[in-house]
Amino acid sequence: MEYKDYYKIMGLSKDATPDEIKRAYRKLARKYHPDVSKEANAEAKFKELGEAYEVLKDPKKRAAYDQVGRGWQEGQPFTPPPDWGFDFGADQGFAGTQTGGGFSDFFEALFGGGFRRGRDGAYGRQTQAQGSDQQARIQIDLEDAYRGAVSLISLNVPQMDSQGRMVSNVRTLNVKIPKGIKAGQRIRLAGQGMPGFGGGGNGDLYLEIEFKPHRYFRAEGRDIHLELPVTPWEAALGATVPVPTLGGTVELKIPAGSQAGKQLRLKGRGLPGAPAGDQYVALKIVTPSARTDEAKALYEQMAKVMPMNPRAAMGV
Amino acid sequence: MKKEIVVISGTVLDESMRFTLVELCDFTKISPERVIEMVEEGVLEPEGSSVYTWRFDTHALKRLQIALRLQQDLDINLPGSALILDLLEEMERLKR
């Protein structure tokens, strides 16, 4: 396990006052709270911060941490001294934060005894508690949303080991992704959240769905958007061309005289549901490059036969 | 030995879903009084005119849960939470 420098995490010096600790926590918690933060690693940062604050805000834990942590550097391999034993007072134990939950192995090694004592009833305060709800975002493929799938997800969950200590475990779940789910929608898994203790029930798990970026499809609700490359003659003369959809290739009729950007709709070809979404196809005209003399001559002939000023509306 | 794979199914919180006050409390494990307070402070805007006919959508459930986390983690009161939630939604809207 690695040594955690809680002062460094909170941007504080070792002699920070309780007020400074609280101020630093509030400021960083606002910055990294997963519900408001736009930082990429907000969740991990917030969790780390909650752990640091849990220790530094409590004079007893802080003193113990200062004592054991003398001379250690952030990230160094760490083993607690053999005679280590942290004594929780009657009103101690740790509440953690509503968000995140689950402290590092380092924290558990130093202070992880609190739950055990609480559960055994030696101190009697934490006799029963409901496990808190957990949230997670999962990224799935659009194809899985179209067909339905089973997604394997990993979550960090604190669990009680055989000695009654809280340890952080990776828990994997196979979750059914129902057909037609949309980005932003949540799946509620009752009883799959944080474990309760002392007979308290488990919390619930909420999974928020995000779509992985797709090579050419973009989802908006249940509608699917696609930019379809076409040739100038397909656009000008009209044609029936193959178009990929989530359900497979379909034929699309391009009307004669179509311009770039024209949008065509494939009804009901989006994500399934009641009603199913549509697929919108925007035409993108791709011009062949004039590499040979013959090709150049063809373009020149076009300029002569069909002169036009596409910038007329701009007055130039 | 063949390993059995357990697949868990949940409930998709679809936007057509509506919850009563009791169901909402059951989901979030908070008291009706706290929900009523959230309605009074504008965190939640249920359909229906009285406590008995209130119906909350999944969007309200999400707002309620975020408000609870903001309260617990950042010590933000209900009017503050309502403001943050509105601003977050405005940001989402502008991003689109």
Image (tube, helix red, strand yellow):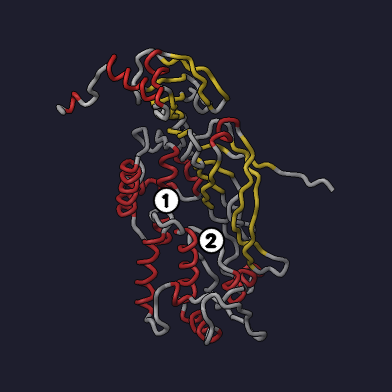
Looking at the image, the residue that sits furthest to the left is: A315
User: What crowding class fits label 1: few (fewer than 14 Cα within 10 Å), some (14-19), or many (20 or more)?
Assistant: many
**Quadrant in the picture for residue B42:** top left
- SS for callout 2: loop
Q: Is A144 drawn above or below residue A131 in the view shown? A: above
Q: Residue at x 60, y 57 (%)?
A: A196
Q: Quick check: can you spot residue A283?
A: no
* Mark 1 and mark 2: Cα distance apart in space: 15 Å
Task: Give how far across and how far down residue B87 sits, in percent.
Answer: 30, 48
Looking at the image, the residue that sits furthest to the right is: B1
- Residue B66 or B40: which is nearer the viewer? B66
Task: Give how far across and how far down residue A155 sits, in percent.
Answer: 59, 54
- In this picture, residue A263 sits left or right of residue A274: left
Labelled pair 1, 2 in contact (Cβ < 8 Å): no
- Residue B83 or A32: which is nearer the viewer? A32
Count every numbered label the image shows and give the total: 2
Name the disc covering residue A189, or none: none
Tag 1: amino acid? Ile
Q: Disc 1 is attached to a residue of which chain?
A: B
- Residue at the disc numbered 1: B66
- Residue B74 or A298: which is nearer the viewer? A298
Q: Quick check: can you spot residue A6?
A: yes
**Quadrant in the picture for residue A112:** bottom right
- Residue at the disc numbered 2: A101
